[in-house]
Image (cartoon, rainbow, N blue to C red):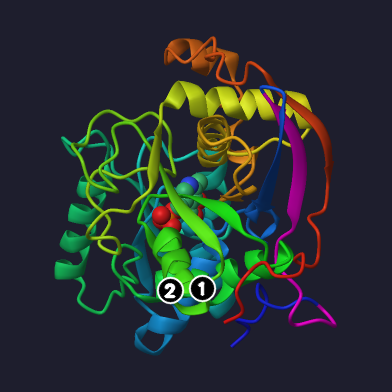
Amino acid sequence: MRDTEFQTRPGDASAPLTPVLAFQLSVDGLPACLWLKLESHNAHGSVKDRTALALWRDVAPRVHPDTGLIESTSGNLGVALAAIAADHGVPFTAVTDPRSPASVVAAIRALRGTVVTVDRPDGAGGYLLSRLAHIRERLAAQPRLVWPNQYANPANPRAHAEGTAPELWSQTGRRPARVLVAVSTGGTLAGFRDFVAGARPDWELVGVDVTGSAALGGTPGRRLLSGIGASRPSSFLPGGHHPAVRVTPRDAVGACLWFADATGVAVGASSGALIAAALRLFRAAPGRADIACLCPDGAAPYGETVYSAHWRRRNGVDPPGDFARGVHVIGSGRPPERAPAGTGRTP
Ligand SMILES: Cc1ncc(COP(=O)(O)O)c(C=O)c1O
């Protein structure tokens, strides 16, 4: 099985898969440090490469070469699973919806995946429940088809508890930090929660969701952005998560545009939500620990949405709010490799 492709780097198996950049900010005149872990540097452009590999390892023994796999995805997991399925010569069907970025859908097809676009709204502000209903129908008709089920499979959070989170901790010198994680299935945040419970880094873990999402509880409603949020509560986080920050689509989009303009680093919509949340937290508690954001993907899939003025106007998120007033980027680089003496707890 060639499943080591995403996990190792030639010559150094322990090297991090994705980089962390550090940005020094001035927020209302006070210094603040923002770390971004850029998951767009994974082989297929998102943090879901890690999830896909863990899911594949879990289901591979059950996968039949004629029927293969089916999974519900807003896009990123679909690309990563399509790549693995192609590598192993098994069929893969991605069940997506009209909000899935066109470039991501094209990437799944280029990897020989079949794309089914479910366009029936689920009555909860999105399409997730309709996508899942479609999968259940397919499984009933074709019992040998395998559904990894990213929404409930413990392999999803495990990928982050054992990979993404310890990687970030070591890349940031095991320093105290507030760590911001975007939520959809909740798998990434639950994995970080499990890592914090075991290794006990000096982190405050903050869940970031969008308005209209029920992923961390609350009533679902209309949502504009793909990749972040969900029509129902995360099964990995049955009690929700505290603390959590909820960001409007206008602020998430505005943060993408502001950050690209200020730094030249263009990130995806969920990462925009994280940056908007970080600015809010810096202001609410000036001088507190640095903030690290796990940025799930980059700007590439959002050329026709977040980074299109036409789309922004059509969806009422232009012009962006002035949430970045008083914030200046004054420097950038890599984070320190070692913690100052006496900080951070060792596992
Ligand atoms: C664009 C985007 N946003 C948010 C997330 C967080 O997702 P989850 O809660 O399913 O781990 C992901 C995960 O890959 C993502 O790709």
Question: Is residue 83 toward the left or the right of residue 13 in the image?
Answer: left
Is the C-beta of the residue carrying label 1 under 8 Å from the nearest atom of ligand 1?
Answer: no
Q: Position of residue 344 (x, y in %)?
A: 63, 69
Q: Element under label 2?
A: helix
* Residue pictured at 51% horizontal, 40% vertical: 270
* Residue pictured at 63% horizontal, 55% vertical: 39
Q: Is residue 305 visible?
A: no
- Which label sits on residue 1? none
Q: Position of residue 82 (x, y in %)?
A: 51, 63
Q: Which residue is mark 2?
A: 197
Q: Which residue is mark 1?
A: 200
Q: Position of residue 336 (x, y in %)?
A: 81, 59
Label 1, residues with CA under 10 Å away: few <14, some 14-19, many ≥20? some
Q: Element under label 1?
A: loop
Amino acid type of the residue tagged 2 in the rendering: Ala
Question: Is residue 332 toward the left or the right of residue 163 in the image?
Answer: right
Q: Which residues are magenta?
A: 10-27
Q: Quadrant of residue 12?
A: bottom right
Q: Nearer the viewer, residue 201 or 71?
A: 201
Q: CA distance from mark 1 to mark 2?
A: 6 Å
Q: Nearer the viewer, residue 346 or 42?
A: 346
Labelled pair 1, 2 in contact (Cβ < 8 Å) = yes
* Residue pictured at 54% horizontal, 9% vertical: 319
